[in-house]
Image (cartoon, rainbow, N blue to C red):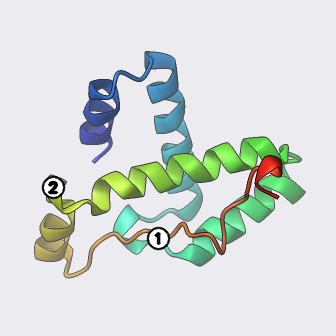
Amino acid sequence: MITGWRRQMLSRNLSFATVDAQQRIVRRFHAYTDAHPWKWSPGDLEKWTAELRTDGGLARSTVRSYQHAIRHFLDYVTDARYGWVEECARRFDTHPVQICSEWNMAVHATDY
């Protein structure tokens, strides 16, 4: 999944630095949950980002960028054009879903 997402981002002409940073964030979330993407839940994202703010002392803008990386990764793996939903359903009897929504994502200050 990560390799395919990397190719997709590079195809969109994103910089290598951006692609690498996005991948690091997703890998960090994967390590935090100790679960594969088809097991992630909105609660996992909320717990992680709350801990990043309270225990990690990260800025709101940093947390927002982390959330967006997870959202973009899940946009990729849940997009039917890439086949991951079907592949995971076939192999694991479940599949990844988008866990990021307007209810658990930080908004930019200018959005207020």
* Up-down relation of residue 29 to residue 11 (above or below): below
Q: Amino acid at mark 2?
A: Arg
Residue at the spot x=83%, y=50% of the render? 109
Q: Residue at x 55, y 64 (%)?
A: 33
Residue that numbered label 1 is attached to: 40
Q: Quadrant of residue 50?
A: bottom right
In the image, residue 73 lies at what x, y percent? 41, 50
Q: Secondary structure at mark 1?
A: loop
Q: Residue at x 57, y 49 (%)?
A: 68
**Relative vertical location of residue 80 with respect to residue 20 in this rendering, above or below:** below
Left or right, residue 65 beside residue 109 = left
What crowding class fits label 1: few (fewer than 14 Cα within 10 Å), some (14-19), or many (20 or more)? some
The local secondary structure at tag 2 comes to helix
**Residue 85 appears at what percent x and percent y?**
21, 68
Mark 2, Cα crowd under 10 Å, few <14 / some 14-19 / many 20+, is few
Residue that numbered label 2 is attached to? 81
Instruction: Tell me if 29 is positioned left or right of 109 in this view.
Output: left
Q: Nearer the viewer, mark 2 or mark 1?
A: 2
List x then y, in percent, for residue 31.
Answer: 53, 53
Q: Amino acid at mark 1?
A: Trp
Estimate the spatial distance between the alpha carbons at disc 2 and disc 1, rounded to whole Å: 21 Å
Above or below 88: residue 28 = above
Of the 4 image quadrants, the one containing the C terminus is: bottom right
Is 110 drawn above or below residue 103 in the view shown?
above
Query: Seen in the image, is 44 located left or right of residue 14?
Result: right
Of 29 and 106, which appears nearest the observer?
Answer: 106
Q: Which mark is residue 103?
A: none
Which quarter of the figure has residue 77? Answer: bottom left
**Position of residue 12 measured from the top left corner of the image (x, y, whole percent):** 32, 28
